[in-house]
Structure formats: structure tokens, C-alpha cells
Amino acid sequence: MNDTALDHRLAAIIGGARATARANDALEEAFCALPRTKPAPRSRHREESADTCPRRRWPQMAAAAALASLLVGGSAYAADKLGIIDLHWSGNHQLMVGIGNDEDADNPAPTATVDGYRLSLAYEPAGLTDERTLFADSLDTPGRVRTFYSDDFLESLSVTVLYRDTDEAFPLSSVVESEEVSVNGREGLLVTTQDTAERRGLTLILPFETENRIVVIDANATLRSEVLKVAEGISLVADGPVERAYLWLWSDYLDQSVSDDESDPDEGMHATFEEMGNLHGIGDTFPLSSEESGLAEDADRAASGALTATVTDVAVSDSLSDLARPEAIPVEWLSLAREDGSLGPDLVTYGAWGDGVNSVDTVIERRARPIALVQATVEYANASDEPLEDFLVNAWLLSARESFDGWSVVRRERAVPGADFAESTAIISMERTAYLDVEDGAVAADSEGGNTIARLDPGEKLTVRFAWLVPRDELGQLLLDVNGDGTFFNKTDLASGYVDIRQPSPAA
């Protein structure tokens, strides 16, 4: 699987109701007695960028990320108990959700083994495909999780089975709608969350009390009917005893519900001229970090500069027809192109973060911006005396301005008062390896022409052409990063150096 497909895959995974007056009155006194949950601070790092360069993400990790995205980050429910689910409000948009666990209360010392159950689905969501069909390297865990994706990876639905090992309450945040649902006689909680300013997610929490399990269905809010159909067809089939060490625990997911991210919002936004001492130009050859490219882990090889890179050419145009591999063009790029391939404007969303407790992410303004296609040709070479195997080739663009005291990352959100972020198709494309074309004859580790190169012999060279969509007014402030994450300045990338590929703006 290449990083682009995995980027879509994780982004797909990663994806309430106003309190009635009577509910608020009834719960107000209880709220005063509850410890207030500290709002999880919103990271300035884009969630989509976290998936920019994943090496390998197994379904358990992906499911955890999907659920964690709901646990940080609300609304009100007009009830304080749904079966064994206890609900308490800690804010206008945050529910404290606890699920009773009488079994562990009667057995304070957990047993080494418990009754095992396997997930069985009588219905699979229409229009989505099982990930085990899409990805040959998927970890086959049908007894614990099933995940499905649309053809464009923009929609997904996952079903996860968790062992109910605690009754500790957790914060379910950014809830904009919520309701009680009854599924085959079981009472569950169905919530809609404002995952981002533009996207809503849907989560169904359904306890299986007899089996001491909790089933969580996570999906796009657009898949509500499919979520309910899937839920109606769920059964947990007895599968013999299982060791607790091999269970997926409810508490494991609760541990991710509180973020300790207190990062400095200005961290990585500025680099001095001294820190930018390794700034390269087009035609310069420089070594890459073996750690970032997934090469051998030993320090000697990392320092030896086994893999080098040279940016040989940069081209700017206004049409997707200039790309050599039409089949590799991201779907979201195609939506911005006219019939002849020429690029239309990109719509930038400026929004404000919510704290997930008393506010949610909101859109302040949208603006259309003209964009261009930027292509960069990078020549990789094995400068060592040993073959290089299974390494990654990645490239990101960083928009930065040079000033009297160094370089500063462009803060696009500052164009709109009150905005905390600016997002668009072009901006996202700059922050990841979205399109690449490996020269004919290069051996990739996957059949889709991905960015994992199987082998490069001593002295051998490999040419890769990358492409991005870029706002036209940022063409004169582009730095190319072929070593790490191009979203911010960081020590690894500064050590290897960025490449100055600033371009004049093409004629409008």
C-alpha cells in the first residue's frame, strides 16, 4: 500500500443534541457535584497531516484513532441513563458517558482469561467495500473489527468490539445531535459529532451486557441508515476463552479521551538564518535522513548519507493534463478541473476551533483562490556501497516568507479576523505526497506505483516526479521538503535542508 492510499484510508476512518429545558433543570444540580472535565486543548497541527507519512497503521490503531477523534474535541442529551449507559453533562457540547460494569465490581481481581466472542455481521453497508478486499496487507481481525470504505475513501464505516473492563466515565465531545436508539432490544447511544468545521461523524455505542462487550460503530454522518442496518445485523458468537492480554479494552480507548497537547502555537513557525544554513537550490545534491526515509536504523548508515536527493527541475502550469499519470490524479483534484483539464479556483474555508465542551468548530468565511499545478523532479541516488531496500520517497511543500530575521511559515488564517485555520484542497495537497510518478523501470513495493521503493543498488539513480496544487499567490514563497513533514520547520528537516523552489506567478 502506498502512503497516498493509506492517507485516504486513515483520513476516512478519522472522521449531538441540544439539551431540553427540563433535562437541563434536572441535571443542573448534579453538574455542580461533578468534577469539571478540563477541555482538551486543540492542537494547531492539522489532523490530516498526522497521516501524512504513516509507515504502517494496523486496524486496531486506526480504530483507536477514529474513536479518539470523538473523545476529544459537544451538545446535550435529554436523559441521564440509557440502560447501563450513564450520561452527565460537563458542557454545552460535551457528554460524560459511563457504562456500568457489574462484572468487574464483583471480581476486583480480574481473571487471566474471559469468555471470547467473535463479531459477526448479517448485513454489510451498501456501496462500501471491506478493507480486507481493498488492502492485501490488512490485519485480518474479523472477530474484533470490520471496516468498510467507499471507492474514493471519502466515506467509511467501522465496527469495533471492546471488552467492558471499567465503568469510568469519559468525555464524548463536539456533539451536535444525540438520541437514544433501540437495536434488537438493546439500548444504545447514537451521536453526531462536529469532527471538523466541514465534516460530521456518527458514532453508535451499543452495549452487549451479557457478553460484557461494547460495540462501537463509527461512520460518516451521511451513512446513518447504513449504521442502523449494520447494527441490527450484529451478533457476537461465542468463541471459547481468551486471555485478557489479547482483548481490545474499553479502557484503552478511554485513555485517549483526554489530550495533553499543550504545544506552543508558534512552535515550528519560524527559523533563523542560522537554522536555515542548509538551504539548497535547484541542482544541489544533499543527503537524506535514513530515519525519515525508512532505511536501516543504525546511526553509522544514517550519517553516511547513503541516500541523496537532487531537485533537477520545477515546472508550473495551470492544467492537470500536464501530469503523466492521469490515473494517479487524486479525485479531489479532478473536482477543481474543467473539462479540458485547466484548473478552476479552489475554495478556502476559514474557521475557528471549538473547545469541544462549550463550542464546536465553525466556518467563518469561504474565499475562492486561483491555483496552479507545481511539479518537481527529484533524482535519488544510492551513494553507499550496499543496496538500499524498502525505503520511502516523499515530498511536501512549505509556504514561507523570508524576512530580516529568518524565515516564517505563512499563517493563512490571519487573512480573516477570528480564524484559527484555513483549509482547502490545494493547501492539503501541499502538506502530503498526493501525486508522484516513478520513472519506468523502477521497482515499487506495491503494484499501484506507490512511494515505497523496493531496491536501489550502489551507484544507481532513480527519478521521481511529484506534483501539488498551490495557491497562485504562494508560488513566490515555496520551499520543498524531501526529507520529512513540510507543514512546519523541524530539527530533522532543518538539518538536511529545504530546497528553495520559489517561482514567479504565472499569467492569470
Image (cartoon, grey):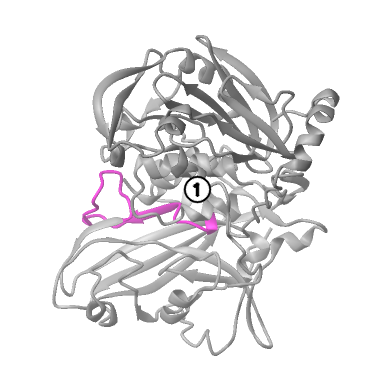
* Figure quadrant of residue 406: bottom right
Residue in the foreground of this view, choosing between 86 and 222: 86
The magenta segment is 429-451
Q: Residue 505: where, in percent of width, then height?
A: 64, 66
SS at badge 1: loop
- Residue 471 position, x and y percent, is 64, 58
Can the viewer see residue 248? yes
Q: Nearer the viewer, residue 363 or 432?
A: 363
Residue 149 visible at all: no
Residues 505 and 336: in front is: 336
Looking at the image, is 496 positioned above or below residue 239? below
The C terminus - image quarter: bottom right
In percent of width and height, residue 272 lies at: 59, 85
Residue identified by numbered label 1:
255
Is 109 left, or right, of 507 in this rendering?
A: left
Q: Label 1 sits on what residue type?
A: Asp
Count of numbered circles in the view: 1
Q: The N terminus appears in which quarter of the rendering?
A: top left
Q: Tell me what residue is drawn at x 57 percent, y 13 percent.
A: 182
- Residue furthest to the top in view is 184
Per the picture, the main secondary structure of the magenta-coloured stretch is loop
